[in-house]
């Protein structure tokens, strides 16, 4: 979608100065920057750099149900229901990473893939980019979970899951964004009519 004129950038920008790596592992790198703020004032800025893309997939079945995965999350210490998701290597086609994650976490394959979004997950402190897909034409597949994952599956009506996201019961940002985007695509005719009717029934 073309951005409207009012979204054009204007005004002073941040200026980056000397940088120092504070922490580095195979997944992230934390860098501390000496910077100058748009106000002209000096600032110290920490950035978490990600070494993979975040990949999210919303699998929508022909009957309008969607498959979610449930797992315990280390950082929040909470159990989370969310779309199948994972990391995609930067040098690999994101769609290939999405196909792998869908098979690993749900044992599903999709005949049709629609790119739903490319979003910045927390652009004040990280450079992490997420790419979301809608997967349809689902069929059984095989795949193995990572050796750190214990996952449950739930297949629920799209509208029920959308309501849970809108009401705050689902908190994962990739999940909420994909559900809202799928609803928008259904409303604007970007999804097949039969699938739209099943989703919104």
Image (cartoon, rainbow, N blue to C red):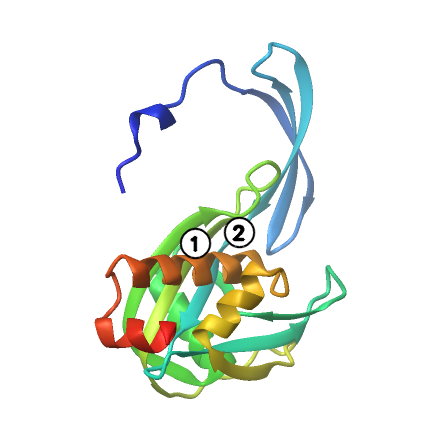
For residue 92, say whether it is visible. no
Residue sitting at x 30%, y 69%: 113
Direction from residue 85 to residue 42 in the image, left or right: right
Direction from residue 82 to residue 133 in the image, left or right: left
Residue sitting at x 65%, y 53%: 25
Q: Which mark is residue 90?
A: 1
Direction from residue 142 to residue 197 in the image, left or right: left
Q: Residue furthest front?
A: 201
Dot 1 crowding, Cα within 10 Å, few <14, some 14–19, many 20+: few
Residue 108, given in percent of the width and then of the height, sits at: 41, 83
Circles 2, 1 touching at the beta carbon (< 8 Å): yes
Please tell me whether residue 157 is drawn above or below residue 18 in the rendered image.
Answer: below
Please tell me whether residue 179 is drawn above or below residue 143 in the rendered image.
Answer: above
Q: Which mark is residue 38?
A: none
Please tell me whether residue 18 is drawn above or below residue 92 in the rendered image.
Answer: above
In the rendered structure, which disc, 2 or 1, sits on the residue that comes first in sequence? 2
Residue 141, given in percent of the width and then of the height, sits at: 39, 88
Residue 19, given in percent of the width and then of the height, sits at: 62, 28
Q: Nearer the viewer, residue 146 or 197?
A: 197
Residue sitting at x 27%, y 57%: 188
Mark count: 2
For residue 193, say whether it is visible. yes
Q: Quadrant of the N terminus?
A: top left
* Quarter residue 100 falls in: bottom left
Q: Which mark is residue 51?
A: 2
- Quote the CA–CA distance across marks 2 and 1: 7 Å
Dot 2 crowding, Cα within 10 Å, few <14, some 14–19, many 20+: some
Secondary element type, mark 2: loop
* Quarter residue 167 falls in: bottom right
Residue sitting at x 37%, y 28%: 7
Secondary element type, mark 1: loop
Residue 2, given in percent of the width and then of the height, sits at: 26, 37
């Amino acid at each position: 979608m073309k951005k409207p004129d009012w979204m054009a950038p204007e005004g002073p920008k941040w200026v980056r100065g000397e940088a120092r790596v504070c922490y580095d592992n195979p997944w992230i790198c934390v860098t501390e920057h000496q910077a100058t703020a748009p106000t002209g004032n000096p600032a110290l800025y920490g950035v978490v750099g990600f070494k993979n893309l975040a990949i999210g997939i919303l699998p929508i079945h022909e009957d309008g149900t969607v498959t979610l995965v449930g797992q315990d999350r280390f950082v929040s210490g909470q159990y989370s229901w969310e779309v199948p998701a994972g990391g995609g290597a930067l040098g690999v086609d994101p769609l290939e990473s999405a196909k792998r994650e869908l098979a690993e976490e749900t044992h599903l394959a999709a005949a049709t893939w629609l790119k739903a979004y490319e979003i910045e997950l927390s652009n004040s402190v990280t450079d992490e980019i997420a790419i979301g897909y809608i997967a349809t034409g689902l069929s059984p597949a095989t795949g193995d979970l990572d050796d750190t994952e214990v996952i449950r599956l739930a297949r629920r009506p799209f509208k029920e899951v959308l309501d849970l996201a809108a009401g705050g019961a689902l908190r994962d940002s990739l999940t909420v964004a994909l559900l809202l985007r799928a609803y928008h695509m259904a409303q604007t005719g970007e999804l097949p009519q039969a699938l739209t009717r099943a989703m919104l029934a």
